[in-house]
Amino acid sequence: MIKITFPDKNTKEFNQGITGYEIAKSISPRLAKEVLSITVNGNLWDISRPIKEDAEIVLHKWEDEEGKHAFWHSSAHLMAEALESLYPGIKFGIGPAIENGFYYDVDLGNEKILTDADLPKIEQRMRELVAQKNTYNRKNISKKEALNYFDGKGDEYKLELINDLTDGEITFYSQGNFTDLCRGPHLPDTSPIKAIKLLSIAGAYWRGDEQRKQLTRIYGITFPKKKMLDEYLEMLEEAKKRDHRKIGKELQLFTFSQKVGSGLPLWLPKGAMLRDRLIDFLKKVQVRYGYLPVSTPHIGHKDLYVTSGHYEKYGKDSFQPIKTPNEGEEFLLKPMNCPHHCEIYNSQQHSYKDLPIRYAEFGTVYRYEQSGELHGLTRVRGFTQDDAHIFCRPDQLKEEFIKVIDIILYIFKALDFDNFVTQISLRDKNDKEKYIGSDENWEKAESAIIEATNEKGLETIIEYGEAAFYGPKLDFMVRDAIGRKWQLGTIQVDYNLPERFELTYTGSDNQKHRPVMIHRAPFGSMERFIAVLIEHTAGKFPLWLAPDQVVILPISEKHNEYAKKVSKILNNSDIRTLIDERNEKIGKKIRDNELKRIPYLLIVGDNEIQNEEVSVRKQGDGDKGKMSIEKFKNYFNEKVENLLKSIDTK
Amino acid sequence: MIKITFPDKNTKEFNQGITGYEIAKSISPRLAKEVLSITVNGNLWDISRPIKEDAEIVLHKWEDEEGKHAFWHSSAHLMAEALESLYPGIKFGIGPAIENGFYYDVDLGNEKILTDADLPKIEQRMRELVAQKNTYNRKNISKKEALNYFDGKGDEYKLELINDLTDGEITFYSQGNFTDLCRGPHLPDTSPIKAIKLLSIAGAYWRGDEQRKQLTRIYGITFPKKKMLDEYLEMLEEAKKRDHRKIGKELQLFTFSQKVGSGLPLWLPKGAMLRDRLIDFLKKVQVRYGYLPVSTPHIGHKDLYVTSGHYEKYGKDSFQPIKTPNEGEEFLLKPMNCPHHCEIYNSQQHSYKDLPIRYAEFGTVYRYEQSGELHGLTRVRGFTQDDAHIFCRPDQLKEEFIKVIDIILYIFKALDFDNFVTQISLRDKNDKEKYIGSDENWEKAESAIIEATNEKGLETIIEYGEAAFYGPKLDFMVRDAIGRKWQLGTIQVDYNLPERFELTYTGSDNQKHRPVMIHRAPFGSMERFIAVLIEHTAGKFPLWLAPDQVVILPISEKHNEYAKKVSKILNNSDIRTLIDERNEKIGKKIRDNELKRIPYLLIVGDNEIQNEEVSVRKQGDGDKGKMSIEKFKNYFNEKVENLLKSIDTK
């Protein structure tokens, strides 16, 4: 008998060799149907693999990342089998599960070029193979045998992968007629894969190296139920409509230029104003919380990054140093603001009474990304962080965390992100050596974060081993209106930079002490945040933030004069107002402007002029009746103020 | 007889060979005493040089740059003579007149090191030489003879200079025992040099090349009257007190860090807030004038600068290109914002009805300067321009100029710069080929600028030949409180970038037309402007701008609580308020805080607490009596509002 310990610390005895599936079945037949993978003593396993000794286990269903992972990884193997049966001689690179689905990189030789038209045929073959209910079989194999097998197939990619592995740690998985080099885990058999959709084809360099061969990457997704696939495809359709690149163009928020360079957004006036409004909004909140603005250059001498350690760690993969004509100096584009802020901290003496000091900067930083990785505003080469660094005493950590959490919650409320979770990333308990900073400080910081999130009543996930080497952190993950997850705000403790920059404060004991540093960015970056905001709201920004708040639609040309008068009154009251003076029918004007997502449409014609009124329409919500100009102004301003008041409840 | 034409176009006949001095004497003996140099047919001459043919002349006195130039250049030769008599074997580099005085670069050999202690002795020798009333004698000399002369002296510097000259165009000037290679002009003799002060000693590379020998540069200044020297030295003393680097440190506005790099200012909280206030102030003005904010990255692909022409023109002397790890792309730190703004203009189609379009950005740019050239905030390697680019039709130029002038005048008024002149830089009429853009457009633009300045009643100087090759411009030069000149705002017409970026708009004729571009920056740069503002106000900023507006001084510790209450009330009304809680006598608190240039000091003690009052002191202006907190709030806000209202009269 072996002892199995469940996540709730309950234990139960089972026969040696029991499998995860059987354990699940012993609990309930329903669970047995749902379980997809199992964690055994910290390692992910197949649920069909016999457990031979005492173990702590966690069973994973579809709802868990680990469950989906096994499902989609098995689907990748299934697709590979289908491909091999359709295209004999095909060679395989890697085929992992990803956040949504899976892919496989394949080499079809020089003749065959796969197109979207081929995908239904491959899907069909996959369905046929599912019907065979083939089991996924795990097998330990020696390095020599493994090499022999793929040598026989002539698959140089797998040979290269195997050559990097240690003999004795290699496993194969087979199902049906297909065998793959794989660590697993997989489903017991193919039967749960009820719905299959291959999504797209892309090019991908072997091992991400542009010098090597470009393989064909096939993306797909599978589900245990047809309905889930339908919903997913519907979400994809909706996501396409909400694509911030599309809406950003329609609303003239930003653009890119080949001459300026990929991944370097140019903010057009409406976008720049939106960005400024968000910045002003956060600046105001930050003043209230005692932040001090600073402003630093976008480059720093190489020495700065040698001191910070960034040069050694990231130098090779970053924008390269900027040389000067004469003096052999070298500068780097700043990839983060913290080293500059440490130098500002060091420009003056500090006493324990001065702390915490909170330096805030909307600092634009530059990080090199391969051009293939760039994506709209979410993956760029230059972005503006809503950055701040808090220098505090260790005993102030919890209070500072609470204050930063307050700011983030305030922002989420102001911008309609009501669905979010937080993740606390702590040390790996079994490998404390790899972290910098004393045990005592780590414990203090970790419990400060946990207590702070508890006090604020946050829904948290704790991840051990996910902390950076220099400190624990708290991340905020929001779900947008169509259910996608985005990582936004981060609060990160740092024991490393205070050491490297030799930051000190004089304590009440008159001795020098090391402050703790907190990095925090509620938006993350202006670029990414605005992208998420666009996709979350489908471009229908909260009223206070909307680039254009009101559009006036004169019924015919003779009403333009009155429209101008109304527009002037509203603009003078800081209501951002446009006029649609085009010589078009009022019906078309309404339709066109509804599409532009301007919150209020004011129709003006003879009647309105006579009574000094406007006919009010709310975007997507129809007629609101006639109002005097003054009344509309008050009505509008009340809406904005109520919105801001409702969040401004500190 | 020859015909001499005066600047007022009057003419007079003189004997051939008449000199400038004699012409002056023929007008008045007083003028003869004052004249220092003469422009003859566009060339600067000695007033002792015979005029042999008809000529247009301008006589220059001390008040004219050209007069001072001859005076100081003669003084440089005088100093050289003194040096040679004191240090035989000394070799000479160059010795020009500069904006304030003159210098000479000398090589004293490897043994002698000149220090400040040597300067009085040199001054004394100069005075002795002045007493000799030696004449400055001009002599044409062949290249061969010139080389022979300095070969004999063993002066390799002069030999190198002569080698670069064209035979037939070489002149020597001698006075007393000293002979120099020189183009002139000089005074007739040394006697007008009545007051002499050698100011400082510095190192200077021969020909500015760090690879070559470092010479000793001796700075001096001379005047025709002792009183003028005294006033100048007093001004220097005052300038030292107002040095923005000193005040910037005292007021904790900015700092520099060796690790971040020279010439890269770090704005401390008080400075960053001051900067933000100035930016917000200008943003508000710009919105009123129809500017649209944009935001662009701090780097651009090399292609952008190849297109703009900057790469070819400045590439070698600038920060060098930023390479990327993989793709062989090259980026440059942006030295100006205009190419980015051109790309934004080009991202959309424009009709003649849309123009003018005014893109504004507080854009931080980076320009390489040798480290020896850097100086506080006035000469830096990174600075934020209050930049805007106006794209307009040629017929809109004048109106746009007037509007930009309005903005600049508004800013000068708001910031107490009431002493300024403008300079209009036009084409060289005799060499129109070197300018880009049609004759018609140039004429339109030049007369637009002249008319605009006339209509605004500006005091202007017109300089022909000072225009950039791509367009005429208007510069604003302010005089600060101690009489120094600073170049601030610039308005520059540009025909070049619209060509290079192929900018177009559709005219009313439905054809494509080229817009004109105006670059303009009222502050110039935030860094330089704040430096000038500090030196102009000696750190006593206008009330609305002051980093700290009020400091509360509790008479003893028991009054701290009340001080906090008052501070909270004032801060909540956006009055920037501090408390001096130090355990010091009130007299010392008052003295210390007066030095900090905080506009209002509020003293609070038992009496004030009892009556809910504060005792108000105005910095530098003494007691203003007791007021209730509410009354002080109103009194203060009125001061700020009146100040802003008085300028806000559009």
Image: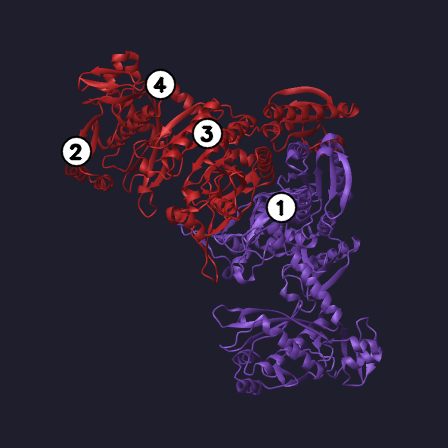
Chain colours: A red, B purple
Q: Is residue A171 left or right of residue A216?
A: left
Residue B370 visible, this orientation: no
- Name the residue carrying label 1: B275
Q: Quadrant of residue B236?
A: bottom right
The CA span between labels 4 and 3 is 30 Å
Residue B127 visible, this orientation: yes
Residue A373: image location, x then y, percent:
41, 40
Q: Chain of mark 2?
A: A
The CA span between labels 3 and 1 is 33 Å
The CA span between labels 4 and 1 is 59 Å
User: Tag on residue B143?
Assistant: none
- Image marks 2 and 3: residues in contact by CB distance under 8 Å: no
The CA span between labels 2 and 4 is 35 Å
Q: Quadrant of residue B52?
A: bottom right
Circle 1: residue type: Arg
Q: Chain of mark 1?
A: B
Q: Earlier in the sequence, mark 4 or mark 3?
A: 4
- Name the residue carrying label 3: A476
Q: What crowding class fits label 2: few (fewer than 14 Cα within 10 Å), some (14-19), or many (20 or more)? A: some
Q: Is residue A543 left or right of residue B478?
A: left
Q: What crowding class fits label 1: few (fewer than 14 Cα within 10 Å), some (14-19), or many (20 or more)? A: many
Circle 2: residue type: Ile
Residue B429: image location, x then y, percent:
70, 67
- Name the residue carrying label 4: A225
Name the residue at 50% across, 30% down: A399
Circle 4: residue type: Lys
On screen, residue B137 above or below B99: below
Circle 3: residue type: Phe
- Which secondary structure lies at badge 1? helix
Q: Nearer the viewer, mark 3 or mark 1?
A: 1
Q: Are marks 2 and 1 on the same chain?
A: no
